[in-house]
Image (spheres, rainbow, N blue to C red):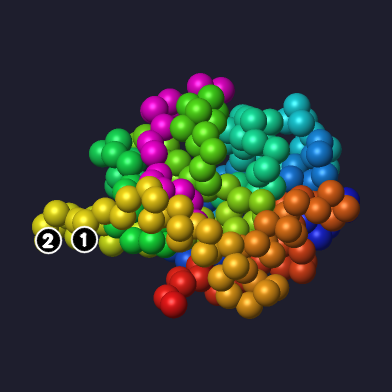
Amino acid sequence: MIHEQVRREVAEAARQMVLRGLAHGTSGNVSARIGRDFFAVTPTGTDHASLAVADIVVLDAAGRIVDGRLAPTSEVPMHLGVYAARPDVGAIVHTHSDYATTFSILREPIRAAHYLLAFAGPSVPCAEYATYGTPRLAANAVAALAGSRATLLANHGVLAVGPDLRMALTVAESVEVVAGLYYRARLLGVPHILDDAEMARVAELFRTYGQPAEGVEAAEGAGASEGAEGAGASGDGRVPESGAPVPDP
């Protein structure tokens, strides 16, 4: 089996997606870059909680199967489209998390009701609707994602990206946490929204938050290494089981 380490990390990220309540059953998908021209992706129609390393499919840049016994996720066009447009992206986590998907149904952005959203950007936009698995959805997602790390997919879910799987999961989880807070705040009144300047300050603080080996800056460095087997790898051969960090100075 080729590229076993990155495939193991993709399988673990998919399990974490379920454990953290970001997806249910077979919904959602995960992928990671392997060097420049290959990608490891979750298979279609398979329970993420029981994925084996061998279930993860390796594709080339054209979407052809290089190694793997199962069919890849139906969202291959979206994953490959993002990788082609965003060389900074080393991993993708696509979820159907409840609160964020609620806003995708409203076709409203998730605004900065809490600074934790800075892991994704100053806000999370909503891409135009298109049928799942289509080139049109891929194009809409790429356009909405622009220079940020997350976008909603109208009437569908969330697309979160990062330099590695660790950060892509953190972005996806942060979006869901803030979506839940924003939803509840709107039920009680009119939320106070942090402005773009404050979110930029927080994003800069996040770059060095935590212990040296675990901060966002360290995660970015691990994902950017061309010498690593997979650019989407976390750098330590595993996806952390803890939830997204919530900085509280």
Residue 67, x across and y down, in percent: 83, 42
Q: SS class of the residue under badge 2?
A: helix
Q: Residues within 10 Å of mark 1 (few under 14, many from 20)?
A: few
Residue 156, percent from left and from top? 40, 39
Q: Dot 2 corresponds to which residue?
A: 188
Q: The magenta stretch spans which residues?
A: 118-136
- Judged left or right of residue 133, residue 249 is left
Kindly state the secondary structure of the residue where label 1 is placed.
helix
Query: Which secondary structure class fits the magenta region best?
Result: loop
Which residue is more in the foreground, 187 or 222?
A: 222
Foreground: 9 or 162?
Answer: 162
Specify the amino acid type for callout 1.
Answer: Arg
User: Residue at 46% of width from left, 32% of height from top?
Assistant: 144
Can I make out residue 179 in this image?
no
Name the amino acid type tagged 2.
Answer: Leu
Q: Residue 191: x percent and y percent?
A: 19, 56
Q: Position of residue 38 (x, y in %)?
A: 80, 39
Residue 199: which numbered mark, if any? Answer: none
Determine whether label 1 and label 2 are within 8 Å by CB. yes
In the depicted structure, whether residue 126 falls above or below residue 9 = above
